[in-house]
Image (tube, helix red, strand yellow):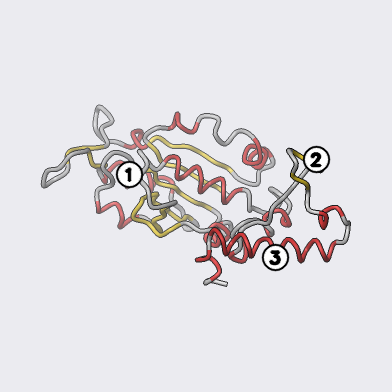
Amino acid sequence: MKIDILTLFPSMFTHIFEDSIIGRAQQKNFVEIKIHNIRDYSKDSHQKVDDYGFGGGKGMVLMPQPIYDAIEALRTKESIVIMMTPQGIPYKQKLAYQLTAKKHLILLCGHYEGFDERIRDFVDMELSIGDFILTGGEIASMAVVDSIVRLLPGVIEEESHMKESFHENLLDYPVYTKPVEFHGKKVPEVLLSGHHENIRKWRLEQSIKKTIARRPDLLEKR
């Protein structure tokens, strides 16, 4: 998979994808991630990319020309162009799985007051990572890239993400490690029993209980 990220602030991505699982995925050529400065595509002598919005109001609006040219310079027949915006569809784990099947993703990070509305004509999808506002789309794009890359074949063991929160619309079961007792609280006996079927049943039961308590809305989708 190839992922291109369009941003006004490339330095925000310095080292962010170089470590841990994402870094190893790039080293093993499971994914190629490149960061592009939108200003490089501006035709203005000062690399201007924003201006005041028509009709008044505070804040600067991103101009369509630099973003259009940036998208067109990177787009291929296999590309999916994704705009990171609070107006987008809610990003869910199911969509993360679907995006792993794509060969090329272009993520567009907004900033300031937002995008010129006409930019939307040139994207394939708009995503939101939650009902809150960030200073720009960079942090949101980092979250999306992380969530997708870890699901690519070979990056981590499939069993690891098949039993995580949101798989089959359940939250993850509790996990424990050494010591067996800590501050008076002990690891549940079933996890020490070595009985795999009982452990499986206990974990499913705990996932359901946790989902009922914390995210009952997920159970409506099961």
Looking at numbered disc 2 in the image, what kind of residue is underneath it? Lys
Quarter location, residue 177: top right
User: Would you say 102 lies left or right of 7 here?
Assistant: right
| Residue that label 3 marks | 205
- Residue 130 screen position, x and y as percent: 42, 52
Secondary structure at numbered mark 1: helix
Residue at coordinates 65% horizontally, 56% vertically from top-left?
Answer: 172
Mark whose residue sits in front, 3 or 1: 3
Secondary structure at numbered mark 3: helix
- In space, the residues marked 3 and 2 are separated at their CA atoms by 23 Å
Q: Is residue 124 visible?
A: no
| Residue that label 2 marks | 178
- In space, the residues marked 1 and 2 are separated at their CA atoms by 52 Å
Secondary structure at numbered mark 2: loop
Q: Given contact means CB atoms under 8 Å apart, are the residues at marks 3 and 2 in contact?
A: no
- In space, the residues marked 3 and 1 are separated at their CA atoms by 49 Å
- Residue 109 screen position, x and y as percent: 39, 43
